[in-house]
Image (spheres, grey):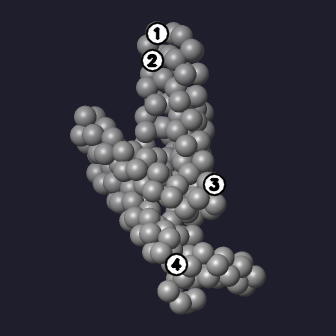
Amino acid sequence: MDSMAIKYQLLKFRSARNNLLLVVAFTTINLFFAAFETGYYFLFSAAVPQALFGIGSGLAEDYQNNAFLIAGAILAFVGVGLYLMCWTLAKRWRWFILVALIFFSIDTILCILLIFIGEFDIFFLLDIACHIWVLYYLIVGVMAWSKLSGANQSDVDAAMTDMSRRS
């Protein structure tokens, strides 16, 4: 693989990581929106952490016990933390982008299930579209990782150094 092909794959991989970071940021913001009951919601976020927080919040209200709210918040932030861990570790060990893809695939399946279990709203189609967007970029990142793993590591390191000097 020549230098330009390596740089192209590195850019694809970087795009996948950047999309994953956006998911982490928007999910975190959404959790704070939910905690303060603002009524706002950003698309482009993970559904499971928000559902866990919502379940904890609902149980806390039903049983008048804030332990459920705290447990839901902890589980939600652990979920976001897993995505953040994948984003961080994927810079050093590229296979973590595959782990993020697996997590987000599960999140997408559960998001679809939650939509069909609950009351359907046309707004949910946008949520699914954003999940598909992120899945696309994570798949592109996994494919880039696969192609980069077949390249000479010193060529990949040289391309990364050259790219970091230019940006």
Question: Within 10 Å of the Cα at label 1, are there few (<14), some (14-19), or many (20+) other Cα atoms?
Answer: few
Across and down, in percent, residue 57 comes to 49, 24
Q: Assign a secondary structure to mark 4.
A: loop
Residue visible at 43% across and 26% down in the picture: 55
Q: Which residue is mark 3?
A: 88
Query: CB under 8 Å between callouts 3 and 2?
Result: no
The numbered disc on residue 63 is 1
* Nearer-the-camera pick, 131 or 157: 157
Closer to the eye: label 3 or 2: 3
**3D distance between C-alphas at marks 2 and 1:** 6 Å
Q: Assign a secondary structure to mark 1.
A: helix
Q: Assign a secondary structure to mark 2.
A: helix
Residue visible at 60% across and 48% down in the picture: 85
Closer to the eye: label 4 or 1: 4
Q: Which residue is mark 4?
A: 151
Q: Which residue is mark 2?
A: 59
Query: CB under 8 Å between callouts 4 and 2?
Result: no
Across and down, in percent, residue 31 comes to 56, 39
- Quadrant in which residue 34 is drawn: top right
